[in-house]
């Protein structure tokens, strides 16, 4: 399974990239398992394990670590600078002066 991971704000600064396609190992089927897989890279990736890190799957707020991920999903990672607007997630990418609604 492959997922497209987007990194915003502090997460982007920590890992040094804005996005990547990841070939997910068998057995990783939730956003929490994906987070743990990314954190296992060590070093700056540990920031993703911090309290407050939020995820969106295909532009919808992930309700928790048990939210399922599927082949081809877009998974956005953001440190606590996200704002929930009803059922949607708002992220401001301050380096590019763009606003993203998930």
Image: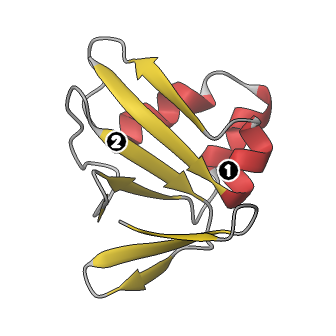
Looking at the figure, which quarter contains the C terminus?
bottom left
- 48 above or below 89? above
Q: Locate residue 33, reporting x and y percent.
A: 38, 33
Instruction: Give how far across and how far down residue 5 sits, in percent.
Output: 46, 37
Q: Which quadrant of the figure contains the N terminus?
A: top left
At horizontal 70% and vertical 38% (from top left) the residue drawn is 46
Direction bottom: furthest residue: 86
- Residue at point 39% right, 73% down? 89
How crowded is the residue under tag 1: few (<14 C-alpha within 10 Å), some, or many (20+)? many
Q: Which residue is mark 2?
A: 74
Nearest-to-viewer mark from 1 and 2: 2
Residue denoted by label 1: 11
Question: N-terminal of the two: label 1 or label 2?
Answer: 1
Residue closest to the eye, 8 or 46: 8
Residue 83 located left or right of residue 94 = left
Quarter holding residue 63: bottom left
Tell me the element at label 1: helix
Residue 42 image offset from top left, x and y in percent = 72, 25
Which quadrant would residue 71 be assigned to in this image? top left
Q: Residue at x 24, y 49 (%)?
A: 67
97 vs 82, nearest the viewer = 97
Q: Residue 67: which numbered mark, if any?
A: none
Vertically, is 22 above or below 51? above
9 lies left or right of 3: right
The correct choice, above or below, for 64 with respect to 86 in the image is above
């Amino acid at each position: 399974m492959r997922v497209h991971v987007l990194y915003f704000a502090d997460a982007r600064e920590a890992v040094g990239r804005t996005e990547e396609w990841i070939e997910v190992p068998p057995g990783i089927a939730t956003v929490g398992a994906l987070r743990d897989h990314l954190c296992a890279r060590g070093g700056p990736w540990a920031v993703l394990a911090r309290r407050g890190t939020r995820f969106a799957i295909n532009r919808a707020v992930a309700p928790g670590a048990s939210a399922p991920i599927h082949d081809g999903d877009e998974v956005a990672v953001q440190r606590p600078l996200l704002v929930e607007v009803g059922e949607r997630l708002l992220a401001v990418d301050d380096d590019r002066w763009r606003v993203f609604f998930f």
